[in-house]
Amino acid sequence: MTTSYNFNSPLTEWGNYTGKYHMIRRVYEEAVAKGIFPRTRLPDVPPYVHPKNYLALSFTKVLPFAEMLKLVPKYSTSSGRAPNMEALGQNFGFILYRVEGKLPLQNYSIDDPVNDRSVLYIDGAEVAINNEPLEEPFVYNISSSNLDHSKEEHSFDLLVENQGRVNFGIFMQTQRKGLHNSEIKLDGRPVANITTYSLELNSSFVDSLQQLKVAPEGPWIQVKNFKHQNAPAMYSALLYLSLHEEPGDTFVELPGWTKGNVFVNGFNLGRYWEIGPLKTLYLPGPLLRRGNNRVDVFELHRAGKELHFIDHPKLF
């Protein structure tokens, strides 16, 4: 589900007037003149509010995904059954299922549906992406040439994203995200021990990450020293706004970024994806403040170098 809904409406997402608004107003005034509606005085139209451009923002530090997982709730089961997101009391965000196995291994599989977009990682490296929910069994054939044979055990992580739920009909009561009490198999044999990580990415969690220190004392590292550019990670930077000017509306553009979520001062602004249809996210001025504003981006794949703040939306 997209963050913005701006389809042929009288007002834009940022509260300004479209041609349709003026047409509706004119039709109403004509109806008043003809006696169809009671005569009344319409209020004057407030002045047009112009969104703002701000300087491009470069990111200075990054928190690797492995460090994020150390801070989220995790659940271990020896029953060989993976719980869904809702069973853990989680409503939004991501859920990750981890199993471990020893070589030689030929395939990783799940016979039951995988509900929503999923990514499979082996030893932290992305090996498969499913952009749609999977109703058929998921089987990934393992190439042992890509594995580090010096390791005794290898981790297999399935990260499932909740991209939104159907908000009408009987499906409203039946949707569950992730795996549905399912088995995860290596070479056709169910794995008994499954560790599940709950990444709701709520504001309190995003805020708590800022309490961590930057290397060498802590897990945050400088972006220039980050070697895993195609792995999930949280990027952070500060957007400075003048102390003498009221912050205004703007639009966040993410050139070169792939897929993820943007947070501004801990507020989850929305989801972006390079395939569109949204190319920008509306950032309301009241979410910003004079001075420093923290901008965090949770990128799932390939990160860009900058965020741009422009004065108009790009919706297609």
Image (cartoon, grey):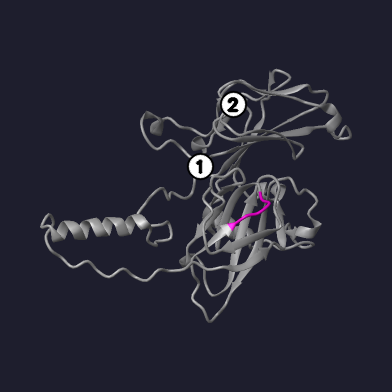
Q: Residue furthest right?
A: 150
Name the element at disc 1.
Answer: loop
| Image location (x, y in percent) of residue 44 | 27, 70
Q: Position of residue 242 (x, y in %)?
A: 57, 78
Residue reaching furthest top?
188
> Callout 1: few (<14), some (14-19), or many (20+) C-alpha neighbours within 10 Å?
some
Judge left or right: residue 267 versus residue 148. Answer: left
Kind of residue indicated by mark 1 = Gln
Check if residue 270 falls in the magenta segment. no
- Is 255 magenta? The answer is yes
Residue labelled with disc 2: 81
Pick the front one: 14 or 100: 14
Mark 1–mark 2 distance (CA, rounded to whole Å):
17 Å
Say which residue appears at 57% left-offset and 51% top-offset. Answer: 279
Residue 269 has which mark?
none
Residue 225 figure quarter = bottom right
Tell me how many marks there are: 2
In the rendered structure, which amino acid carries the disc numbered 2?
Arg
Which comes sooner in the sequence, label 1 or label 2? Answer: 2
Q: Which residues fall within the magenta stretch?
A: 253-257
In the rendered image, the vertical position of residue 104 relative to residue 58, given as above or below: above
Q: Which residue is mark 1?
A: 90
